[in-house]
Image: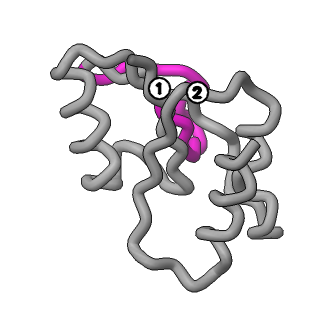
Amino acid sequence: MKVCMVGYTFYENDGRVLRYAETLAKRGEYVDVVALRRKGQSKVGRLNGVNIYRIQEREINEKNKFSMVSQTILPEKWVIVSDGPTDGTDEIVQRYTSK
């Protein structure tokens, strides 16, 4: 199975996303993660079997934080890691996953 995780976070610093992605990779899944990129980091990387695609920076307009997803091929399965945000993230996720 192919899994794409989109995290509005820095991958290496978010233990929840990191552990879940690496667990899936160890299980034999093909795992891509789209995450934020810090200055000096490469745009593409691989860590413990997980392919990491880093975007440049956070967007000021929170309504568009998943806009890079709409420009890519949609994955077979979505894995959303959410801690109950109050910024409208759940509605944005629903819009993209219903496509």
Q: Are marks 1 and 2 in contact (CB under 8 Å)?
A: yes
- Give the colouring mode of the picture: one colour
Q: Is residue 69 positioned above or below 96 on the image? A: above
Q: Is residue 91 positioned above or below 54 on the image? A: below
Q: Which of 37 and 23 is in front in this view?
A: 23
Is 46 covered by the magenta stretch?
yes
Residue 38 in view (yes/no) = no
Please tell me how crowded label 1 is: few (under 14), some (14-19), or many (20+) other residues with Cα within 10 Å.
Answer: many
Q: Which quadrant of the view contains residue 21? A: top left
Which residue sits at x=76%, y=42%? 99
Which residue sits at x=55%, y=37%? 34
- Closer to the chain start, of discs 1 and 2, is 1
Which residue sits at x=56%, y=55%? 8
Is 47 placed left or right of 10 in the picture?
A: left
Q: Element type at marker 1?
A: strand
Q: Element type at marker 2?
A: loop
Q: What stretch is highlighted in magenta?
A: 33-48
Q: Is residue 14 positioned above or below 42 on the image? A: below
Which residue sits at x=81%, y=31%? 71
Is 67 placed left or right of 18 in the picture?
A: right
Is 55 placed left or right of 49 in the picture?
A: right
The residue identified by callout 2 is 75
Please tell me how crowded label 2 is: few (under 14), some (14-19), or many (20+) other residues with Cα within 10 Å.
Answer: some
Residue 10 image point, x, y percent: 46, 50
**Amino acid bearing label 2:** Pro
Seen from this angle, which residue lies furthest front?
Answer: 98
Residue 62 image point, x, y percent: 75, 69
Mark number, residue 32: 1
Residue 6 image point, x, y percent: 54, 44
